[in-house]
Amino acid sequence: MNNNAKATFSGNFGKQRIIFITVCALALLFFSVLMWGIKEAEIGFLIWHNSVFENPAALAWWKWITRYGLNIICFTEGLIIFISLKYERLRVLQPALFCALVTYAIGWLAGDALKEWIGRVRPAAELAGQIANTYVSDSPSYPSGHATKAMTLVLPYVFLAPKAGAAGRVIKIFLMIVALLVSYSRITLQLHYPSDIIAGAGLACALTLVALPPVRMMISKWTPGFNANKYFYMYIGSVFLFLAVIFLFI
């Protein structure tokens, strides 16, 4: 394994990054609760998106993003891992993607548990007659599952991946744009309140901190050139590609 990646995930990159992620998590979660309390602003923002339902092209675009955005993220991250097996300079990205997968797994469970515990009513049920969307999901609203999943897949990579040249920066920007589009699509389709989306991002930041210690512990035991690393990341890449396919059916 590249020494830069190992140093980063063994905890030798200092406290500043941990503090930054912590601040992001607290700020986003606080802001989501604050927005929830400002009902008029949230409702007004959702009603403003009634215009999306009057534009067939815009509606089709946002439905496509909300349907396939997670597939794009998982396929891209799986592809990055398999490409990195061939190009050594991209191997520094592997641990961050492993951390993203662990964060995603925790986020899936934690997000669904929070939904049921909080039990916030969906916009279509609470604002019937005021917004264009009439579909009421069986699951509660807060936090947004799509936003949580998209951000847990992307933010750990954005926060933790070491520098890998222009390619690494382009990948970060692309994945962040897709995650933001997936999250925002839930508002444009009036399936979630803005505070639901912000909570999903805040939860992703918080769970990055939860996933980081076990990922660090595992990686700190590895040594550069350890052959099992290659097969381990082939497995991780396959899991991402498997998720990309599974998301087509759920």
Image: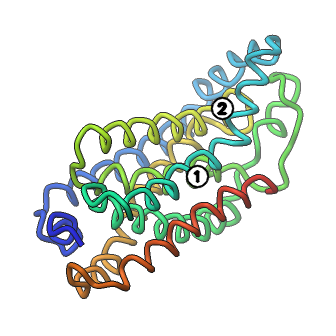
Q: Please state, as top left, top right, bottom left or bottom right, where the N terminus lies in the image.
A: bottom left
Q: Please state, as top left, top right, bottom left or bottom right, where the C terminus lies in the image.
A: bottom right
Label 2 packing within 10 angstroms: few (<14), some (14-19), many (20+) = many
Q: At which x and y percent is residue 91?
A: 30, 62
Label 1 packing within 10 angstroms: few (<14), some (14-19), many (20+) = many
Q: At which x and y percent is residue 76?
A: 52, 49
Q: Say the numbered circle drawn on residue 187.
A: 2
Quarter of image, res 12? bottom left
Mark closest to the chain's N terminus, 1 or 2? 1
Q: SS class of the residue under badge 2?
A: helix
Number of numbered discs: 2
Q: Nearer the viewer, mark 1 or mark 2?
A: 1
Q: Say the numbered circle drawn on residue 242.
A: none
Q: Indicate the amino acid at tag 2.
A: Ile
Colouring mode (rainbow / by chain / secondary structure / one colour) = rainbow
Q: Are circles 1 and 2 on residues that touch, CB within 8 Å?
A: no
Q: At which x and y percent is residue 13?
A: 13, 63
Residue at 61% across, 29% down: 42
In the displayed structure, would residue 142 be above or below residue 128?
below
Residue at 22% across, 43% down: 165
Q: SS class of the residue under badge 1?
A: helix
Residue at 22% across, 82% down: 220
Q: Indicate the amino acid at tag 1.
A: Phe
Residue at 70% across, 19% down: 49
Q: At which x and y percent is residue 152?
A: 49, 56
Choose between 204 and 26: the one closer to the eye: 204
Q: Say the numbered circle drawn on residue 75.
A: 1
Q: Residue furthest front?
A: 86
